[in-house]
Image: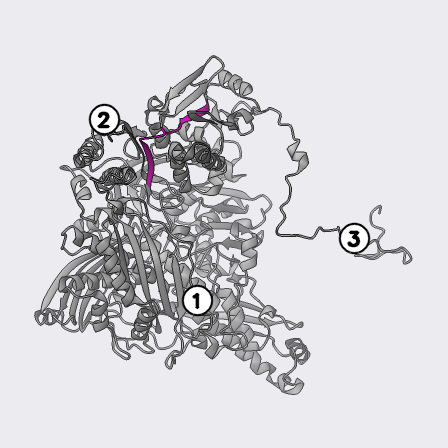
Amino acid sequence: MENGNGGGCGKSLDGDQPIKRFTPPGFIEYKPDTELIFPPTLRKHEFKPLAFGNKRKKWFRPVTLQQLLEIKSAYPSAKIIGGSTETQIEVKFKNMQYTASVYVGDIPELRQFEFHDDYLEIGGNIVLTDLEKISADAIEHYGEIRGQPFAAILKQLRYFAGRQIRNVGTPAGNLATASPISDLNPVFVATNTVVISKSLEAEVAIPLSQFFLGYRTIALEPNAIIASLRIPVAKEKGEYLRAFKQAKRKDDDIAIVNAALRVSLDDSNTVESSDLVYGGMAPITIPAKKASEYLKGKNWTDPSTLEGVMNALEQDFDLRFGVPGGMATYRKSLALGFFYKFYHEVLADLADKDVKADTHAIGEIEREISFGKKDHDATQAYEQKVLGKERPHVAAMKQCTGEAQYTDDIPVQKNELYGCLVLSTKAHAKLLSVDPSPALDLPGVVAWVDHHDLPNPEANWWGAPSCDEVFFAVDEVFTAGQPIGMILAVSAKHAETASKVVRVEYEELPAIFTIEEAILKESYFDHAHYIKNGDVEKGFAESDHVFTGTARMGGQEHFYLETQACVVVPKPEDGEIEVFSSTQNPAETQAYVAQVTGVQANKVVTRVKRLGGGFGGKETRSIQLAGICATAAKKTSRPVRCMLNRDEDIVTSGQRHPFLARWKVGVNKDGKLQALDADVFNNGGWSQDLSAAVIDRGLSHIDGVYKIPNVHVRGRIAKTNTVSNTAFRGFGGPQGMFIAETYMEEVADHLGMPVEKLREINMYKDREITHFNQELRDWHVPLMYKQVQEESDYQKRREEIEEFNKTHKWNKRGLALIPTKFGISFTALFLNQAGALVHIYHDGSVLVAHGGTEMGQGLHTKMTMIAAEALGVPQDDVFISETATNTVANTSSTAASASSDLNGYAIWNACSQLNDRLAPYRAKLGPSATMKQLAHAAYFDRVNLSANGFYKTPDIGYIWGPNTGQMFFYFTQGVTAAEVEIDTLTGDWTCRRADVKMDVGRSINPAIDYGQIEGAFVQGQGLFTTEEMLWHRASGGIFTKGPGAYKIPGFRDIPQEFNVSLLKDVEWEDLRTIQRSRGVGEPPLFMGSAVFFAIRDALKAARNQWGEESVLALTSPATVERIRVSCSDPIVERVRVQPGEGEKSFFVSI
């Protein structure tokens, strides 16, 4: 045996032979103040032209301009690739194919720039990051006045995309794609920039004013390229140029409307020329021609000039209600608002003594880098050896370094196949035919899977608690995005390509999208719970005032970092199957995989290492993908993997339920509430999923924190043709409390009373009874309400804000103080149970398994701390490997903020059993004995060092109808004060400060809890402000199905000052949870609504200024559009667009 002459691992047969040891390399000491040089070898690298490909696809990489022009001459249709930021979108989402592509990133001639006397010439392929530096240098070179075009470019780049995109995106790419909302193109057009186009035959100068011919169409010959741009500098005197942009979110977002406005004045302030160029107002970047014509020869300082331009702009941009892209009123108001800002900015620069500029309109909201404080001493009074201390998340370092393994990181299995779903493209239709044969003919494609591959028709049905949904559509589809089948191929790319050629024929049927449409057509699911307490009619009769209103809030996309993912591995014996799934619900995944594969549950193991976020979106909706992948694995007897892309995830996985409430409130003159009557509806989507439990929780939280003696509230689930809505952090609680705070705000406005006072008057007191007959114990909301006001200087800031609003015409500030109580327990009684398994090994290490899944919330961190405290060992000696159905069976989903309570007590129970068994050895070996010594001694005495723990929540068991029994084990509570500033000309806003205080009982780990509170607050802020779900009316599909259209909060949306604290110095006498802690995952989310109500407060000031005294009914989310159109100022009122007869909006807001 040639290589087998060793004496075993690490041993040598020759005892005298010296052992060769590894010589460590000589590391150079790292000094933070030094930077590594660019590798000299790479600097000397000589780029050479490349060409490769086949008949279907060719790639070229020229390194000189001449080579590029020759390629373009030979292949006029070749796609020029710079940063590929637009091409990737075209290929991925628009299914565009390019037979020839040319990468131009290594052509030095296209990345040059040169300062000329009257213009700056830049290469077409200069990356935007370099353009920032060049623009800054140009301002220095030409001076601030002549350098105005470059200041405008810099401003637009400041909010354009992220740094990664700016590192590869180019001006030529911006121009060539001809996006109607490009941020740079209006600046280029307004400055009369000239494009230098080159081909083998000619060099042509094309003025930007003649460049854009139509939607995504430009005046560039097919064989030509954009070689450079010549950007003129401004005149030394009398020329003014400013750029503007408004998007759904300030940072890293595409524009709704943008503009570059230029005017040139003579010495008498008469307009010589102007260019008012807008994006987002037409299919192309477009100048406002009538406004420019009107301006010519007019005196800028004449007040009638402003009014004349405003009239002309209305004619230039006469958008109809159903205009593509929607938001007709808002877009028109921005066009006029931008000019209003520009006009007064120029007036201010002119400093004319006879005309006063409206300086309040100048500029935009700026913000500071976020800062804040936490109370790190909150747990000192009850700290133990492990519990109550701030400890880092056990996987934090692994997650930050990329070492943490998620579902799709699992190494590829032998013979593994990749699945790609084929989804319906119609909201409601009959399936006439499904033909996968064109896909099966493609190389690399192995199989097609659909409902025919299930063991029986009944196996196709799933859903909890109502089994009313199918894994695969059979004869009819009920929503756009419903799975029809799955293509299996040898690679993800092969599967994706093949899925697009499966032929599906439909016969369209009428579709319902909104709650209002469902009410009109009486389309409901069979669920109609109610809560009745007291005599509502008597309460109204005895009230001094009765007010009615409507509360409306939209849904929310989960937008977890890791989309739905699954790997299913069939085993060779007995039908065994192993499922790796990104799920919050391993037990239900196990049950349905058993169903679709036709085996018993004991043959199926579901394993979950961790999730990259869940938020409720993987409580039930993950089962759909797992069931389909398992069907595919069973059919092929091969492992199957599928990870959805973001678009697929959004259209299949559901969202937070939109809610509509029609409320009626009776109140006395002194502000004391007497009665509440409400009809509450949620949009369940096409199947019921968890909608019943969500509407129920909405009804139980509709009282907010307020004592109302007479309550009658009813809940219905609207059946529509949207994606099936599902659990989402808060699970109906935020919607119910939003209804409560809405009627409190509007009732206070009707009464002319400060809403803070109305809240205080009606707040529950300790031991009072809710409308569902539960006594409130350990009730600390009134205390926190007082503390937050004191700690945030609330009253002083309220006075300052009132003064600010009096002295600022267009910017308004608002303040809100919002309390919360959130009931902790699953609404389904049987789910309030948990199991745990704890092993102690010879070396004293401890392995814990429990039923909860880790999804970033720190559950495993808290569980290891509980086990460490219970067993008296260091936390580092306790490990949780994964969550699996073969270690802890019949688990509840990780949800309802109850996982620490349930699993923590189960672990404590198991550890108590082990402590009882180890007690004799502790007595024998003494208090200093280590767990290793104890375990060793116990093992040799044949003592069982494994224990199975169990816990079920006591006392609960609410009965709907009779209104008896306890609904929740306890309530997590909190209070938040938030302050905002809004720009009423644009709808832009910033959260200036937020002060959050939560009562989480005795915190197990305050570091984890602070993280949960901060994250939940920002996610809640997104729910109530930037995150708006829109459906495309014509196609019936979701429009906001990716980060391009759907806006979660960005870094700029974090409150500028963000203070978080935990309630301390109180006793929790009645709290019987693990360590007397409270659930913290969901309750803080509603605290984000304080930002919404602060925006409403600011809007009241804006409306009052213009004489609008009616009570504002503000729909959630408070998007920039809703903020702007709610302001009631003369500009927005003059452009308000009403629908024509039968005209409908472009988008449907669900």
Q: Which residue is mark 3?
A: 22
Question: Which of label 2 and label 1 is nearer to you?
Answer: 2
- Where residue 641 sits: x, y (%)? 51, 46
* Element type at mark 3: loop
Q: Tell me where residue 44 sits by quadrant.
A: top right
User: Which residue is situated farthest in the front direction here?
Assistant: 353
Q: Which residue is mark 1?
A: 374
Q: Residues within 10 Å of mark 2 (few under 14, many from 20)?
A: some
Q: Which residue is mark 2?
A: 296
Mark 3 to mark 2: distance in Å? Answer: 82 Å
Judging depth in this view, the residue of 431 and 785 nearest the camera is: 785
Judging depth in this view, the residue of 470 and 961 nearest the camera is: 961
Q: Tell me where residue 317 sits by quadrant.
A: top left
Question: With 814 as the anchor, is 835 left or right in this view?
Answer: right
User: Which residue is situated farthest in the right direction here?
Assistant: 16
Question: With 58 as the anchor, is 668 left or right in this view?
Answer: left
Answer yes or no: is residue 826 visible. yes
User: Which residue is situated farthest in the top direction here?
Assistant: 201
